[in-house]
Image (cartoon, grey):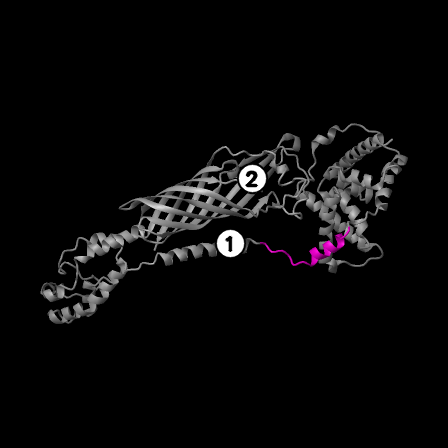
Amino acid sequence: MEDWIDAIKDKVLAEQPELPPGDWERFEADYLAPKRKRRVLPFIFAVTSAAAAVVAAVLLINRPSSPDPISVEHTYVAEVSPVDVSSAVEAAPVEESVPAQAARQVFVPRQVPDVHEVEEASTLTETVDEVSVPESEPVTPSEEPKSEAVPESVKEPVQVERWPDVFEDIEEQTASKRVAFAPIVKGFQGRGNGQLNSGFVGTPLYGSEPSGFCGVHELPYQKLPDAFTPQHAIPLSFGLDVSVPLLPRLALTSGIELSLYRSTFTATETTGGMQLRQRAYYLGIPLRLDWTLWDQGRFSAWLGAGGKADYLISGKFDELRLKDNTVHFSAVGDLGVQYRLLPNVGLFLQPEVSYYFKPANPALETYRTEHPLTFSLGVGARFAF
Amino acid sequence: MRYAARLSALCSRYAGGPAEGMDLMHDTMFKVFDTIGKYRYRGEGSLYAWISRMAVHLAIDRLRKEKKLEISPLDDRLPEVKAPEPADIDRIPAPVLNGFIAGLPAVKRVIFNMACVEDLPHKEIAEKLGITEGASRSMLTKAKKTLAGMIKEYLDKNK
């Protein structure tokens, strides 16, 4: 080995630099301190609790002060069926082989009919005669003429005239006065003049000064060449919305939304052309008001406006874990169109426009920091109950 | 505490600066305290050897995670610099020399430390870094050239 290298070795090995004052004590304190737990789960718990509290509060506020159509219908069943059916069985010379249960089913709808049953029921005539006995019940051939002989006193309590009103109310309830859950998937398209700092990798992630979000232990803050070109993939979101009616046409919608932002940072030729990938998962809580514009038949449309708060729950820049304690806010407007497949199930399309309020110093760059104004298309199913 | 100063100097040389060195030293000490049960006494100096080996492994792991161990072909065009004399080295304070080593690019820094300060053979260096022996030798030559350039510049300024 060269002499000058030996001289360097001897000199550096002989050097014993003094530790900074208090360094050992600081290390002891760090080591003895309880290990810091990740705060993701408490955050998820907190936001879920908050969302549940909002929904519960709205449900309580929205509790009807007078009996709603459903309860009216229930009252109708309770009052009419036992008395009239028994009297009908006694009064009419119905054969003994017809069970009283079957006769009861002729007059009394036991469950709240759905929309399709409503349409069929509205064609019922004024008399009970045309209401058929369910096929599953044993009916003797002599029953049909006997049913014609049911006296008027038996028919009267069955307020068939009320049925259309009741069903109209129920239909309205089906259309707009139900709490609904809606899983939704969204794809985005960005617009706007957001300025992307092409050299940001050299500043927030690897800046010479700790930026506070990567943590001292994750990164040494050594400078990387700042000639990185970012490419942001279109974000994807998956969410679950809960919609609670406030007024016949107005609903409050909230829920949770998980968004994935993917980016690739490519170094220029001078730095070897290496590529670093970033994946950031944000959990969002939307809150908006939806106004039903149109509701006819199986189709309905609504217009909504509100906001959303997002929080980074997990993120990686290459192998490094990202941290960002900032809550990100955005304003959201949407126009939704729904096709009701079943009384309780609808499929909807929901074009949405959102504006992201970019922080002055974003901790990490994503698609939305480059495109603050984004258009997205949501597709989902809505389950009403 | 007995080895703290030596360990601090080693960490500083491997990590690339005093601040990064202290960070590496803290991580090393965390690891030492967590795994002290695995240490077996093998004579005087074996504890420091165990701790320093752990520090070097941690330093290499960090650099690998940060993709700093990739070899860049751009280093090929280094100017030829005349090697300094041992007497020249004596004129340079030790902290300055440590600073020069810490200022070397990551791969060169690690290889120089392993080969020249700790006298590890190129075969072992190549295994630890996941490179070929030839690459290790080549990078060591480049590290020496870079270091010689730094020393020459310093000496020219401080005549």
Could you tell me which chain the residue with mark 2 belongs to? Answer: A
Q: Position of residue A127 (x, y in %)?
A: 13, 59
Residue where numbered disc 2 is placed: A360
Q: Callout 2: 10 Å neighbours few (<14), some, many (20+)? A: few
Residue A44, which numbered label? Answer: 1
Q: Name the residue nearer the viewer: A378 or B18.
A: B18
User: Which badge, 1 or 2, comes first in the chain's sequence?
Assistant: 1
- Classify residue A320 by image quadrant: top right
- What residue is rendered at 64% in x and 30% in y? A269
Q: Start and end of the magenta stretch?
A: A21-38
Q: Hey, what amino acid is under mark 2?
A: Ala
Q: Name the residue nearer the viewer: B136 or A274.
A: A274
Q: Name the residue nearer the viewer: B35 or A69.
A: A69
Could you tell me which chain the residue with mark 1 belongs to? Answer: A
Total residue callouts? 2
Q: Hey, what amino acid is under mark 1?
A: Ile
Q: Position of residue A82 (x, y in %)?
A: 20, 69
Q: Is B95 colored magenta in this rendering?
A: no
- What residue is rendered at 10% in x and 63% in y? A148
Residues at marks 1 and 2 touching, judged by CB atoms closer than 8 Å: no
Q: Name the residue nearer the viewer: B31 or B50.
A: B31
Q: Position of residue A208 (x, y in %)?
A: 68, 40
Q: Callout 1: 10 Å neighbours few (<14), some, many (20+)? A: some
Residue at the right extreme of this rendering: B87
Describe residue A336's horizontal placement relative to residue A194 as left or right. left
Question: Could you give the CA–CA distance between mark 1 and mark 2, rounded to whole angstroms?
Answer: 26 Å
Q: Is residue A191 above or below residue A138?
A: above
